Image (tube, rainbow, N blue to C red):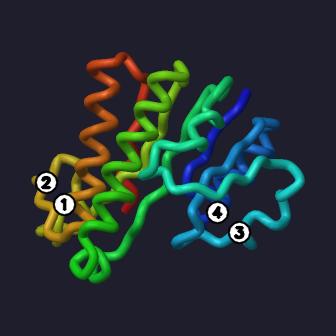
């Protein structure tokens, strides 16, 4: 079994890499280190393939999807204020990169993609805890770009029969 983890040098991603390795799954990590840190993977560096790349650009990183079974797409820019100041960066990272990952999944017959969505799509909640059926009202570029990424994933699932799961982290 082989898995590609985008954003695998981040906090959640690096712990996910550990869990996959504990299950004896071969892991390739794709990360641009904009928020993740290579040090998060120092303890498993000899057990994984670590590729520094920008998923918003369709380049050589796509070859790492060859013979992969799963893609766990955690790569994204997060935070509200920076997304207001630099919406272009967030669109590139959270929408264009997700599109590129989906196309790589489709072309390489990936068995399943798991997408890390965000509860930020609900905006400032009216109730706590927030129900998954609450109204979608993204209020910041970060929230909107994560929701657009989620919609892309679900659309590729429907149109191209790409098995997908979208997890809205709270």
Image-quadrant location for residue 31: bottom right
Quarter of the image where the N terminus is located = top right
Quarter of the image where the C terminus is located = bottom left
In what element is the residue under mark 2? Answer: loop
In what element is the residue under mark 1? Answer: helix
Q: Is residue 157 left or right of residue 46?
A: left
Residue occupying the point 57% across, 62% down? 32
Q: What residue did someone put label 2 on?
A: 136
Query: What distance separates the C-alpha of mark 1 from that of mark 3?
Result: 32 Å
Residue occupying the point 47% across, 43% down? 58
Percent position of residue 80, x then y: 28, 77
**Going from the N terminus, do you reach mark 2 or mark 1 first?**
1
Nearer to us in this view, 107 or 75: 107
Q: What residue did someone put label 1 on?
A: 122
User: Badge 4: few (under 14), some or many (20 or more) residues near its Cα, within 10 Å?
Assistant: many
**Going from the N terminus, do you reach mark 2 or mark 4 first?**
4
Query: What distance separates the C-alpha of mark 4 from that of mark 3?
Result: 6 Å
Q: Are marks 4 and 3 in contact (CB under 8 Å)?
A: yes
Q: Nearer the viewer, mark 1 or mark 3?
A: 3
Nearer to us in this view, 59 or 22: 59
Q: Is residue 95 left or right of residue 19?
A: left
Q: What residue did someone put label 3 on?
A: 38
Percent position of residue 168, x then y: 35, 52
Query: What distance separates the C-alpha of mark 4 from that of mark 1?
Result: 27 Å
**Going from the N terminus, do you reach mark 3 or mark 2 first?**
3
Q: What residue did someone put label 4 on?
A: 9
**Going from the N terminus, do you reach mark 1 or mark 3 first?**
3
Query: What distance separates the C-alpha of mark 2 from that of mark 1?
Result: 5 Å
């Amino acid at each position: 079994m082989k898995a590609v983890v985008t954003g695998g040098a981040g906090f959640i991603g690096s712990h996910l890499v550990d869990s996959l390795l504990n299950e004896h799954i071969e892991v390739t990590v794709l990360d641009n280190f904009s928020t993740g840190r290579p040090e998060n993977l120092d303890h498993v560096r000899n057990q994984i393939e670590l590729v520094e790349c920008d998923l918003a650009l369709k380049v050589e990183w796509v070859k790492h999807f060859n013979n992969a079974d799963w893609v766990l797409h955690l790569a994204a820019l997060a935070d509200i204020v920076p997304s207001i100041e630099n919406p272009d960066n967030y669109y590139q990272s959270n929408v264009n990169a997700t599109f590129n990952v989906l196309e790589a999944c489709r072309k390489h017959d990936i068995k399943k993609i798991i997408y890390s969505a965000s509860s930020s799509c609900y905006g400032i909640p009216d109730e706590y805890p927030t129900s998954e059926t609450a109204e979608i009202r993204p209020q910041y570029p970060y929230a909107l770009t994560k929701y657009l990424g989620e919609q892309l994933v679900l659309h590729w699932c429907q149109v191209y029969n790409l098995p997908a799961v979208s997890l809205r982290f709270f």
